[in-house]
Amino acid sequence: MLNRVKQYLCPDLAIDLGTANTLVARQGRGIMVNEPSVVALQKGTREVLGRGTAVGKLARQMLGRTPDSITAVRPLQDGVITDFELCEAMLRYFIEKASHQKMGLKPRVVIAVPGGITPVEKRAVFNSAERAGAGRVFLLDESRAASIGAGLPISEPMASMVCDIGGGTTEVAILSLGDIVVGKSIRLAGDEMDVAIVDYLRQKFSMRIGVQTAEQIKINIGSAYPLDRELNMEVSGLDTISGVPRKAVVTSEQVRESLRSPLESILNCMKNVIEQCKPELVADLADQGVVLTGGGALLTGLDRFMNEQLGIPARVTEDPLTTVARGTAICLEHLAQWRDSLDDGSE
Ligand SMILES: Nc1ncnc2c1ncn2[C@@H]1O[C@H](COP(=O)(O)OP(=O)(O)OP(=O)(O)O)[C@@H](O)[C@H]1O
């Protein structure tokens, strides 16, 4: 009874603390916050603009286009906190937005984190969340959250494989009987694809573009597999030879070529995980295949590319950008059931 009153006054939260986007789900209500992981500051200070409210969507609009007096910063890189203070400010804003804390009560919070983070990096997440207003904090492996969110039968005695491609990290795991049998996390994902496009345009077009433009190119005409009808896009940038702005037309074939290296790294990570798996479980994968989640899974033709390269079925889950948050929220709803899979910082 007391518990229910507390839940009413201060519902628990599930957080997908991502390099590119942070999502917060409230117990019983679903996703309440879905915003970019960006904070805007007055240059030369540590002060978040708008009295701590220039966070997320508002701050993202400023990224790359800020006047000299304002800077927009991402507090996470490659899936881990790089700016502790700003991460705390960002989390505080999102936690306040998602919950309706009353009487000084603090919500319990489950946070999805990359599988490969170090104990020091984990400690930073615990501290940031606690200082931002969370009560008890539990950490959940992102690949487990992704597979729960994708509805995979991970409690069954059979292999389920998931590949979550975010902004900063790619998480690959094979799960069975509720546990991660083999898992690997690499610090390469969507952001690296953007950088690959920037590098390609500099080398092949002698043109300098920003990562935001590169991301737009990737989303608009990027692909992992040949398209039925190839596309092109006009891009504006700075000519590296003359130093003046100019435009160029980039084709989807060229963008695909630029993405080859990051895609191969992701593919090698998946092959490595499959190689480490027991033959019986590998046999399951031939039928079950791999499920692709995270924003990177939206790259056109990624499922066909993976299917052809790995020789197992590959499919993109429904709404891949919210899969980890939904999985974390399910875990929060059944905290007692998943308790052993969570890290509460005690050891
Ligand atoms: N249509 C699309 N095509 C290709 N990539 C996309 C598309 N939409 C979003 N992305 C990419 O998805 C990435 C963000 O995905 P997501 O929000 O899952 O990452 P994240 O959870 O913030 O990161 P991480 O889990 O690595 O910390 C970005 O790199 C973005 O460019």
Image (cartoon, rainbow, N blue to C red):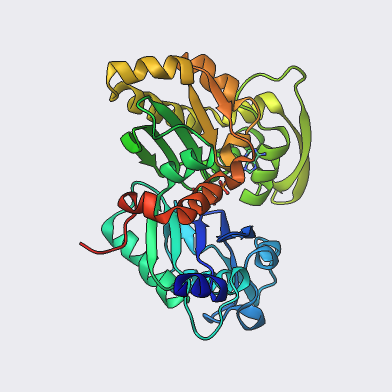
Toward the viewer: 176 or 40?
176
In the image, ligand 1 is in what quadrant?
A: top right
Q: Residue at x 61, y 71 (%)?
A: 71
| Any part of residue 186 in sight | yes
State the count of labels: 0
- Please state if 327 lies on the left or on the right of 81 as rendered: right
Toward the viewer: 207 or 91?
91
- Please state if 273 lies on the left or on the right of 205 as rendered: left
Extreme-left residue of the structure: 347
Q: Is residue 281 above or below residue 259?
A: above
x and y percent of residue 87 in the render? 48, 69
Toward the viewer: 195 or 264?
264
Q: Residue at x 45, y 26 (%)?
A: 267
x and y percent of residue 315 in the render? 57, 26
| Any part of residue 210 in sight | no
Extreme-bottom residue of the structure: 103
x and y percent of residue 152 in the render? 49, 33
Q: Residue at x 70, y 44 (%)?
A: 216
Q: Is residue 174 above or below residue 59?
A: above
x and y percent of residue 274 in the render? 35, 23
Q: Is residue 149 above or below residue 65?
A: above
Q: Quadrant of residue 137?
A: bottom left
Q: Residue at x 28, y 63 (%)?
A: 345
